[in-house]
Amino acid sequence: MTTTVPTLDLTADPVELTAALVDVPSVSGDEAMLADALEHALRTQAPHLEVVRSGAAVLARTHLGRARRVLLAGHTDTVPIADNVPSRREGDLLYGCGTSDMKSGDAVFAHLAATLTEPRHDLTLVFYDCEEIEATRNGLGRIERELPDWLRADLAILGEPTGGAVEAGCQGTLRVEIRTQGRRAHSARSWLGDNAVHHAADVLARLNAYTARDVDIDGCVYREGLQAVRIAGGVAGNVVPDECVVTVNFRFAPDRDAEAAQAHVREVFDGYDLTVTDLSPGALPGLAAPAAREFLAATGTTAQAKYGWTDVSRFAALGIPAINYGPGDPNLAHTREEHVDTRAITGCTDVLWRFLA
Amino acid sequence: MTTTVPTLDLTADPVELTAALVDVPSVSGDEAMLADALEHALRTQAPHLEVVRSGAAVLARTHLGRARRVLLAGHTDTVPIADNVPSRREGDLLYGCGTSDMKSGDAVFAHLAATLTEPRHDLTLVFYDCEEIEATRNGLGRIERELPDWLRADLAILGEPTGGAVEAGCQGTLRVEIRTQGRRAHSARSWLGDNAVHHAADVLARLNAYTARDVDIDGCVYREGLQAVRIAGGVAGNVVPDECVVTVNFRFAPDRDAEAAQAHVREVFDGYDLTVTDLSPGALPGLAAPAAREFLAATGTTAQAKYGWTDVSRFAALGIPAINYGPGDPNLAHTREEHVDTRAITGCTDVLWRFLA
C-alpha cells in the first residue's frame, strides 16, 4: 500500500490552512498522517527551523540566539468525527471537526513558523497528539519525559480555543467518589435494611449549601465550583440499596495546590468515605513574566481566568508562564456543529505577528 | 428425538416428591417437561380428578358436590439454576433450586390431591408457570382469562414460602420514577448550568422524613414502606447533569387500593414530575370467610400479614379469600444456597390433611 502524504501550504492564508488541516482526519490515536504532512511541510517550506519527530508529534525551533524563547503549542488530535469532515465554508464561518478545537490555532502557529523567518524571540513549535483522551497518552507528557529540553521557554502559548481572548493559567480539577453505605433488604420488609440512597441526601444537601469562592489572581478572577457530576445507587426494583456513590467534581482556583484542594473537599464531606479518582493541579496565570506582559501588550487587551483545565498546567509545573490563546470558540468544541469564525483566525495571526515580528 | 416424561410418585412422602420435582429443571418459560410429568402422574395416579392442561400449567379438580371448594395453587417455575440442581439432602435439610420457592408447596398439594380421594371440601389444584418473571406471562393470569371457571373457590391457598406460617392477604407495590431537571454545563463553568442531581436532595430528604404506617386489618399488621430503590444521574465527569431519576418503591397495606396508593405518593412528592412504572394492588386478608377460619383453626395458629406481593392478590381481585401457606423459607428464595427444612414439609402436609380430610 502506498500512502501519499497530504500537501499543506504553510504560507497560504491561515484560514485556508485550517481547512486543509481539518481535511486530514486526526482523531486521537490516529494523528500519524497529519503529523507526516506537517513534518514534510515544515522540512520543505521552513528550512530555517530544526525539526524533530516524536511519535505522532512534530517539533520545530529556531536557533537565533535571542534573549527569550516563546513556545507555541497545539494538539493536532480531535474528538471523533460526527459527519463534520471535510470542512466547509459558509460566509465567514468555517465548519468541521477540529476547526475550533484546535486546528485553527495549529494553522496560525504553523503559518507564523514558516513565514516569520527572523522572529524577535526564538520560537519553538510543538504540534502534539492525544490531548483529547486519557492523560497518560498525552503527547506533551511524552515530550516532557523524552525531549525535556524542547520545552524550555520563557512563555508558552497554547492555541486552545479562547475566541481570541487571553486566558491565563487554569483552574485545577479534582474528582472524588463519596460512598454511602447501608444494608440490603427486600423492599417489602424495608425496616430490615438501611437505605444507602437515603443517606446520600446529606451529601447532596452539603453540595446545595456550599458557597464557591471567587479568587482574584493577577487581575484574573477564578470562579470555583463544587458539583455532583454523577450519582448511582440501586440493586433491583425490590431491594433496599446498600450503596450509593456520588461523584463530585471540584474545579479549584490555582491558589490552591492539589493537596489543599483535596483537604478542602475532605473537610466539606467530613465523616464520609472519599476516594480521589482524578486530580490535576491548576496553573497560576504567571502574567508578571516579561514575555507575558509583552504578549498582552501586543493583544491590546487584558487577561481573563481560564476555567477549564488545559495543558498550560504542565508548563506551569515546569515554571514556565503559560497562556491559552486561540481563535476557536470554546463553546463549540466537541460539538457536531463545530465551526470557527475566520475573522478570529486572521485576528490571532495579526496579534502574534505583532508580538513576534 | 424421543423425550421420556420423568416419573413422579405422588403417593410418596412429600419430601421425596419435593426432591423429584426439583430434579426436573423448570426455569420460567421452560416448565413443559415438569408439566408433562405432573399431568401424567395426576392422570395415572389420581383417576378421581378431572385434569386439564393449559400451556405449561396443569389443573385438576374433584366434583364431589361439597358445599365449599378449596383451591390449592403453586407455581412450578423457578429462578435460574445456580449450580443447585439436582437436589441434595443434608440431615433435615433438602437443598436445591426451588426447594423453598416453591416446589415443596407443590409437592404437598400434589400429594394431597392424589391421596385424599374423598376430601371434606371440593378441591381444585392449579400448578402454573411463569410466576417469577414479568406479570404479563404469568400462567395464573392466562388461566384467569382462558379458564375462568377453574378459579372459582371459597378459599385459595398459595403454597408460597411462609415457613409454615399463615400469611394473609398481601401488600401492594407501586414503583414511580421521580425526575429532577436542570441544565447541562461544563463543570468548569458550573454557574452556567443547573444541577439536577443537587435538586434530588429534596426528594431524598422527603424520603428520610417519611413516617410509614402500620395498619391492622383482621389482626394482621401491615407495615408500609417508602424506599428509593435506585438513583441515577450524570452525563460525564466534567458535565453538570441535567437530569436525575430517583426510583421509589411504595409497599402499601391493602386498605389502600391502587388509586389511593398512587394519590398518596403523588402527595408526598408534590411538585415533582412522577411516572408510575409498576403498580400491583394488595389483597385484603379475607380472614372472616368461613373456610379461612376453618383453615386457621386447623393450623392452630393466627395469621400474620404478608409483606411481599404474591398472586393471592389475583384471587382477592376475584373476591376469593386467599392465604399464603407453604413450607419454604422466604428468606432462602432465589438464593444459591436455597433449601427447605423437610420437617416443615411434613408439618404443612399434616395441617392440610387435618383441614381437608
Image: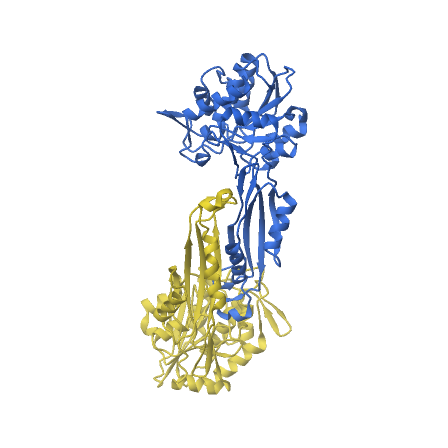
Chain colours: A yellow, B blue
- Above or below for B43 versus A90: above
- The front one of B329 and A123 is B329
Residue A118 visible (yes or no): no
- The front one of A328 and B86 is B86
Residue B165: x %, y % from top left: 48, 31
Residue B308: x %, y % from top left: 52, 39
- Above or below for A182 versus A29: above
- Above or below for A250 versus B15: below
- Location of residue A95 by image quarter: bottom right
- Location of residue A337 by image quarter: bottom right
Q: Name the residue rendered at 60%, 15% in the picture.
A: B49
- The front one of B312 and A312 is B312
Residue A197: x %, y % from top left: 47, 53
Q: Name the residue rendered at 60%, 44% in the picture.
A: B278
- The front one of A2 and B39 is B39
Please give left or right for residue A325 compared with residue A316 in the image: right
